[in-house]
Amino acid sequence: MNAATRAASTSAIAALVLAAAWLFWPAQLGGSTTYVTTHGVSMEPGFSTGDLAVLRPADSYEVGDVAAYYSETLDTVVMHRIVAVEGDRFVFQGDNNDWLDQDRPTADELLGTLFRQVPQGGKVLAAIASPWSLALVLAGIFGVFGNHRRKRPGRKAPRHRAARALPAVALPSFPSLPSLARPSLPRPASPALPASFSMPTRAQARQVAVGAGAVALLAAGSGVLLLGLPSTETEARSQPVTQQGTFTYAGPAEVGTTYPTGAVTTGDPVYTKLVDALTVSFAHTVDAPGLDTVDGSVRLDLSVATSDGWSAPLASGRPAPVVDGTATASAELDPTLAAALVGRHNAEIGATAGSASILVTPVLDVTGTVQGEQFTAGELAPLTFAMDTVALRPPSEGSFAPTGTVAVSVDTEVARSFGLLGVDLPIGAARLIAVIVLVLAVVVTAVAGWIGRPRAGDAADEFAVRNAGRILPVTGLSAGRSVVDVADARALRRVAERVDGLVLHHAGPDGQVFAVQDNETTYRFVFPDTAITRTPPPPPPPVRAAAPMTVPLPRVA
């Protein structure tokens, strides 16, 4: 594979990784993908508890789409199916529910439609983000690096272990050979290092390694802190208690064109000439998630009032007890009595008091508990009949079903979360982020440290890398009038810092020379024996046999 092919493959992989990251980046961290772990049975059989739903925003939403929204009523994220559209609002219902959701979110309030479903993926995600998983990852990382630090390169196994590992072998004996004078062989040069990075690159890599190491320590500390925190916390939440009322009325009437069946029913005008009495009923229901008990009673009070501010009681019904959260109270309404009271009031004031009406007011003496917290039912709007000389006329249909809500503060166990850049981050996601940051920081520290490592045994290279910001490589040095050889490299660095100048670097035959120019004075330090300039010593001259010495013998006479 040539360089062009490798570059193309690397670019393709990087593009795929970036595309996947953009596609699946969670909304809690600024992305657009929402991850929902399903609970309960509302979406069975398609979804089971523990499934993971991946949702993505859509340009438009239609009936039949499975979508998610944040429910203000339940104070949680709900994923159900769209079953109807009312104006600009959507109606949701669970596939396994026989009732509609109370919330009616708009398109802007939807978190997205179903993109992928991972069976039991929610349980896997929860296991990854659990304290035990994070502890295991941290232990593994620190264990690997601990073993790496304890391992010393170049360390050999003890001899006695090697001796035990090899079988005993009887070596053959050879006759002794005469000693020969051998020339000293040159010391082999160190094996060439792989192509290293430039000095500025290695210096920058060291800085990156230091920064990444600090991030790794911070992530490890954060992970340990997150491990020590409980996964849940108690939060005071407002739990709405819904009150639903329903008014009805009925009574006998003269059979005729006006009342063919001889009865008045809810919604009919009540003509006082044809109807002598009317029974008004009111059914009251209390409902809330986690509702424990409901006790008390409900009754109806009837009164007549005129537009000038006068009013008078007509009747009061008997209290009806609450049974299974519901109570139905009733009272008798006498149109003739109401008309007589209004007539007496007009006679007393000597004028017509204006329009008159009959009010049917529910009186609620209802209390209960939600998740152990007490509440008291609030007042609901009365039913008002408009009176004239002919009939009692009922209000619009919406007035027959008054509703109300009581907010109850309850303590709920919720997943612990943290505020990060204006987003509530669950503790599971925070632990997962800590693990990811820790792993990435450790990898960056290892890679950058390897790139920025100094050459083994090369003090000049280590000094150059550590002070790369001030080093200026030159091809030659011209000393000033006076040359000062400093004691060590640290002293030269202090001189460069004092004069705020560069350190000139020249690799020559005598070694690595580093110098600082201060006007006419040159401060210098030379590394005489480095891995760069070290060369094998020349071989000694061959040993030649000495010529025999001739000594003249004395002459004998």
Image: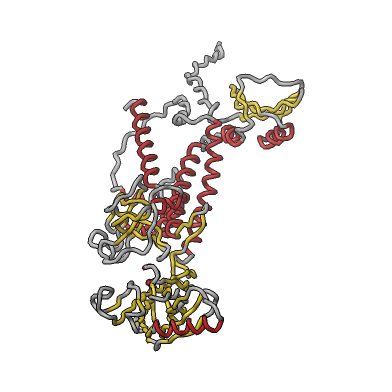
What residue is drawn where x is 39% and y is 82%?
335
Residue 295 visible to the viewer: no
What residue is drawn where x is 33% and y is 49%?
61
Q: Is residue 51 left or right of residue 443?
A: left
Circle count: 0
**Display coloring:** secondary structure
Q: Quadrant of residue 487?
A: top right
Q: Quadrant of the C terminus?
A: top right
Q: Residue furthest bottom?
A: 318
Q: Is residue 416 left or right of residue 58?
A: right
Query: Residue 556 appears at what percent x and percent y?
Result: 55, 12
Q: Quadrant of the N terminus?
A: top left
Query: Residue 326 appears at what percent x and percent y?
Result: 35, 80
Q: Nearer the viewer, residue 159 or 545?
A: 159
Q: Quadrant of residue 474?
A: top right
What residue is drawn where x is 38% and y is 62%?
103
Q: Is residue 447 above or below residue 352?
A: above
Query: Residue 112 appears at what percent x and percent y?
Result: 36, 51
Q: Is residue 178 above or below residue 69?
A: above
Query: Residue 555 appears at what percent x and percent y?
Result: 56, 11
